[in-house]
Image (spheres, rainbow, N blue to C red):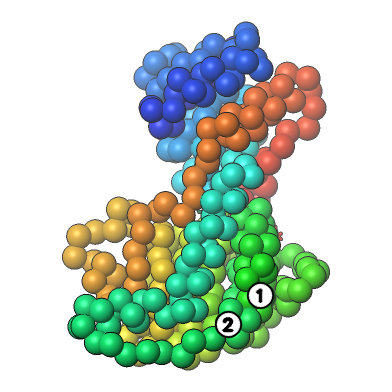
């Protein structure tokens, strides 16, 4: 049995020894070019696989991230299972980033950065977190982890999701019909949707206009959820007061892109969270064992839904 690893080279050794501890017969191979594709049974990769049909004995394609939008799902043969990364540490780290960003927006840090650049000493309103409404789009593994941490700070919480959810202390909304009502109450909006045909460009001129005037946006989902030109216009008109953006339509964000220099935008280079090796290897090993024993796999992707 061959496991082909195509993720961060610096973590390969640790992956290899963690997998060997649970699967001593698994041969660990690193890099797409290291082995004849027909010999590979399990494959972990961030990048899309070119010509996946060459992997004639592939059993599970493991996405190295939580999202699978980089893959052409229609090209993956039905005989190959697709599993994504779900790991408690990945969710904890995402929640840390979202709490940090929500507090920064709530306490108007982007405005203080602008004031500092101009050497202006000017105080702004000081209110507890309970005065701000934070809405999370996408109540999956990551969205739920963020809500749990935001709750500790006493933010007022809202959630929007495809299927209906009932959550203690969170006002929840479902489907497109309730999107506008949800958005109209979000002083701070957090996007944690997966990128699919139904969610691409979901934050555009029309939906951004539904937010309360001056709302903050935290985008940690995917860049293509937001129409960047519409966001820039909303920032310029102060419909959006501040944006903390970790993901972009094109990554890396191009030099000279107006988002780099907008005074009320904070840019981070897709670092909100990432898989941790221990958690990732545990999930992969568990799924390989399940496959070998003919049991149901964990965290498989619904290809029709696209996530
Ligand atoms: P999950 O699959 O666990 O959750 C996705 C959630 O979104 C589900 O609750 C789902 O609803 C909901 N959803 C899907 N489609 C729609 C829709 N059309 N309308 C409303 N709700 C919808 O994903 P994760 O929480 O694990 O990850 C979310 C995304 O976060 C990833 O896909 C990735 O893009 C991004 N990410 C970003 C990282 C970063 O560093 N910036 C790191 C990791 C992930 P339902 O419950 O009905 O299925
Ligand atoms: C992921 C990511 O999907 O890092 O895990 O964006």
Per the image, the residue denoted by label 1 is 154
Query: Mark 1: few, some, or many residues within 10 Å (few <14, many ≥20)?
Result: some
**Mark 2 CB in 8 Å range of ligand 1?**
no
**Picture quadrant of residue 121:** bottom left
Image position of 301 with respect to 297: above or below: below
- Is there CB contact under 8 Å for labels 2 and 1? yes
Front one among 67 and 82: 67
Image position of 248 with respect to 50: above or below: below
Image position of 239 with respect to 109: above or below: below
Residue 57 at least partly seen: no
Q: Earlier in the sequence, mark 2 or mark 1?
A: 2
The local secondary structure at tag 1 comes to: loop
Could you say where residue 208 lies in the image, as x and y percent from the top left?
A: 48, 82
Check the image and name the residue furthest to the top.
25
Per the image, the residue denoted by label 2 is 128
Residue at 44 percent of width and 28 percent of height: 11
Could you say where residue 146 lies in the image, as x and y percent from the top left?
A: 61, 61
């Amino acid at each position: 049995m061959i496991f082909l690893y195509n993720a961060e080279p610096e973590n390969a050794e640790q992956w290899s020894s963690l997998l060997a501890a649970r699967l001593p017969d698994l041969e660990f191979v690193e890099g797409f070019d290291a082995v004849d594709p027909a010999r590979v049974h399990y494959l972990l990769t961030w990048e899309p696989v070119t010509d996946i049909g060459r992997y004639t004995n592939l059993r599970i394609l493991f996405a190295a991230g939580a999202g699978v939008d980089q893959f052409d799902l229609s090209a993956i043969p039905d005989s190959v299972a697709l599993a994504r990364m779900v790991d408690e540490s990945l969710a904890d780290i995402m929640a840390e980033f979202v709490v940090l960003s929500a507090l920064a927006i709530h306490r108007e840090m982007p405005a203080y950065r602008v004031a500092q650049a101009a050497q202006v000493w000017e105080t702004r309103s000081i209110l507890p977190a309970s005065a701000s409404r934070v809405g999370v789009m996408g109540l999956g593994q990551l969205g739920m982890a963020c809500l749990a941490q935001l709750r500790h700070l006493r933010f007022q919480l809202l959630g929007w999701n495809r299927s209906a959810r009932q959550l203690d202390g969170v006002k929840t909304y479902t489907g497109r019909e309730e999107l506008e009502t949800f958005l109209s109450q979000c002083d701070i909006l957090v996007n944690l949707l997966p990128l699919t045909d139904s969610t691409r460009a979901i934050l555009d001129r029309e939906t951004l206009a539904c937010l309360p005037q001056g709302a903050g946006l935290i985008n940690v989902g995917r860049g293509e959820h937001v129409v960047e030109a519409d966001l820039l216009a909303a920032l310029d008109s102060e419909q959006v007061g501040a944006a903390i953006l970790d993901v972009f339509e094109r990554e890396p964000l191009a030099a000279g892109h107006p988002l780099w220099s907008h005074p009320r935008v904070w840019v981070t280079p897709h670092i909100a969270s990432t898989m941790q090796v221990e958690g990732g290897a545990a999930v992969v090993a568990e799924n390989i064992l399940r496959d070998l024993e003919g049991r149901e796999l964990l965290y498989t992707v619904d290809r029709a839904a696209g996530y």
